[in-house]
Image (cartoon, coloured by chain):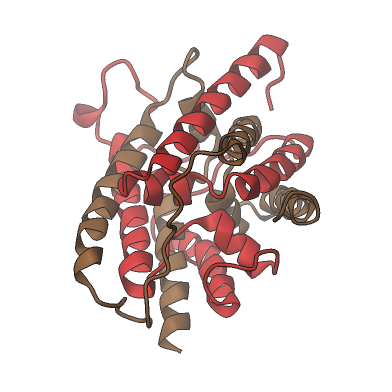
Amino acid sequence: MRNLVSALFAGALFGAGLALSGMTDPMRVRGFLDLFGEWDPTLVFVMGSALLVTAIAWRIQPAMARPLFGEKFSLPTRKDLDSRLITGAALFGVGWGIAGVCPGPGFAALALVPVAAVIFLGGMLGGMILFRFTFDK
Amino acid sequence: MAVPLLTPDWLQIPGFPGADPLAGVLGGALIGLAASFTLLGLGRVAGVSGIAARAFGLSGEGMPRSMAVLFILGLPVGAAILNLLTGRGAGSFPEWPFLLVAGVVVGFGTRLGSGCTSGHGVCGVSRLSARSIVATVTFIFTGIVTILIMRALGVAG
């Protein structure tokens, strides 16, 4: 139960941050990617601030035997740079540029611009299903 | 612009009158707190694409599915609460064909590349993970190139 409430809280805090920062506005995101046009540096501040805060958490984490509301830490361990990582990231960037929306803001926008969010998320679900039945190992 | 800037004039970056660095710093701090809470509280990385795949039943790994569903539900709940309190968050979205195509590419790409802006860009880069740094540089680069190509073709999106 505590787990579930914590997960809802974490998602809500994340969604509030996305809305406050302007990242639920695709124009702002595309403005950041429009480096050779009317560049909007706002995303640099969002990323910088989020990175600083999260870097502190990564410093605290090794000193903890277990997470506050769970049995154990389950964190990514892979270190290899493979072609899937780079191809996937490259494709993601193309989609990110086309719409100015990534998964977090896509879900957050359900509460703000629901029709647009549903179309994007419908496509995203389709893309994930496509992956599941083709390249998923 | 529909939403007024949070940044007062004296804090505005010279040359970028449309930017909102204060909103960025404050919102980014909330995102960082959410990622930190997910890490230290739940023992997981706050990567939205992976959590979404888990919630949709399309991934065999990650947090328990019930937790994934609630995390994803929390995203619009938090955005709605912030929007009610501050009036901020709404944006102008491109036409539906762009949204649909972008959605498919984002869905496939984030699964193939094991993450998106949150998992790689925030959680991985702040951990100094080489995989995440490479992924983040890659998707920002292809995003910039995509916008360049769309501009050259005269496609607004």
- Residue A34: give x, y in percent of width and height: 51, 21
How many numbered markers are drawn? 0
- Residue B19, by quadrant, is top left
Residue most extreme to the bottom: A1
- Check the image and report above or below for A130 versus B143: below
In the image: residue B95, left or right of residue B112: right
Determine whether A134 is above or below A46 in the image.
Answer: below
Residue at 36 percent across and 62 percent down: it is B34
**Residue at the spot 56% in from the left edge and 28% down from the top edge:** B143
Q: Nearer the viewer, residue A115 or B43?
A: B43
Whether residue A121 can be seen here: yes
Q: Could you say where residue B26 lies in the image, as x and y percent from the top left?
A: 29, 48
* Residue at 35% over, 41% down: A46
In this view, the residue in front, A65 or A68, is A65
Is B127 left, or right, of A29 in this rendering?
A: left
Residue A10 at x, y percent in the picture? 41, 68
The residue located at (51%, 30%) in the rendering is B138
The single residue placed furthest to the front in the displayed view is A80
Quadrant occupied by the C terminus of chain B: top right
Q: Nearer the viewer, residue B102 or B92?
A: B102
In the rendering, at what x and y percent does residue B4 appear?
40, 38
**Residue B118 placement, left or right of A55:** right
Q: Colour of chain A?
A: brown
Q: Is residue B1 visible?
A: no
Can you tell which chain is drawn red? Answer: B
B12 to A9, vertically: above or below: above
